[in-house]
Image (cartoon, rainbow, N blue to C red):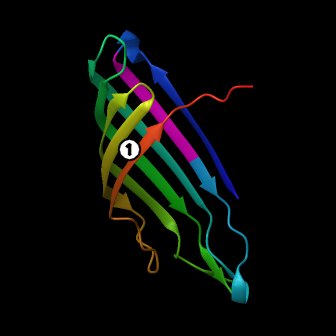
Amino acid sequence: MFLGANWTYTGLFNLRRLVADEDFHSLVRSQGTQRTRLGDDIESRFWLSYRPYESRNVAREWFLGPVLTWIHSGNDRIAGVTQNESGGDVLLTGVTTYVGLRPGMHVWLGMDWDVAHSSGAQFMPVRRHVSFGITQQFRLHH
């Protein structure tokens, strides 16, 4: 089961172009084949961005800023036995940029690097993370 929530606050510290974003999601896993169950995951990503460019009609805009991500992975279970130290925590930091191509459409690129992580014998943390995509906002009419 996947659960997620996010929010955006524009005008942080009364600066119209300063934006704070939080994305939180959790992945709760069920038992798979051969009585194997991977650990549950929780991820929290905080992005503080500045908008150095914004056209008058907001058709084009550019956001840039640092990002901080915390990921928690639970221990795995194989044949009903918990695999100690297979889960752990990792803290990533990096930078993300969004560019508006037209109203409601953005392309984005983000890069994160591991700055701290658990040192469990079986834990394999994310060391670096690159993400990119296209976001299109739209309205559903009744």
Give the quadrant of residue 97.
Answer: top left
Q: Quadrant of residue 99?
A: top left
Residue 22 placed where, x, y %? Answer: 49, 36
Looking at the rendered image, the quarter that the C terminus falls into is top right
The reply to whether residue 134 is in sight is yes
Q: Is residue 5 above or below residue 25?
A: above
The answer to whether residue 110 is above or below residue 90 is: above
Q: Specify whether 50 is left or right of 2.
A: left
User: Overall secondary structure of the magenta stretch?
Assistant: strand
Q: Which residue is mark 1?
A: 68
Residue 60 x, y percent position in the rendering: 31, 23
In magenta, the rendered stretch is: 17-24
SS assignment at label 1: strand
Q: Position of residue 6 (x, y in %)?
A: 56, 36
The percent coordinates of residue 11 (x first, y second) are 41, 15
| Residue situated furthest left in the rendering | 52
Quick check: 49 above or below 43? above
Who's the residue at 35% across and 40% down the image?
A: 107
Q: Is residue 21 magenta?
A: yes
Query: How dense is the environment of label 1, judged by Cα within 10 Å: few (below 14), some, or many (20 and up)?
Result: some
Count the numbered circles shown: 1
Question: Residue at 42% of width from left, 59% of height from top?
Answer: 90
Based on the picture, tell me whether residue 18 belongs to the magenta stretch. yes
Q: Name the residue nearer the viewer: 133 or 92.
A: 133
Q: Nearer the viewer, residue 139 or 82?
A: 139
Residue 80 visible? The answer is no
Q: Judge left or right: residue 17 versus residue 86.
A: left
Q: Residue furthest front?
A: 141
Residue drawn at 62 percent across, 64 percent down:
40
Give me the residue at 70% from left, 79% from top.
Answer: 32
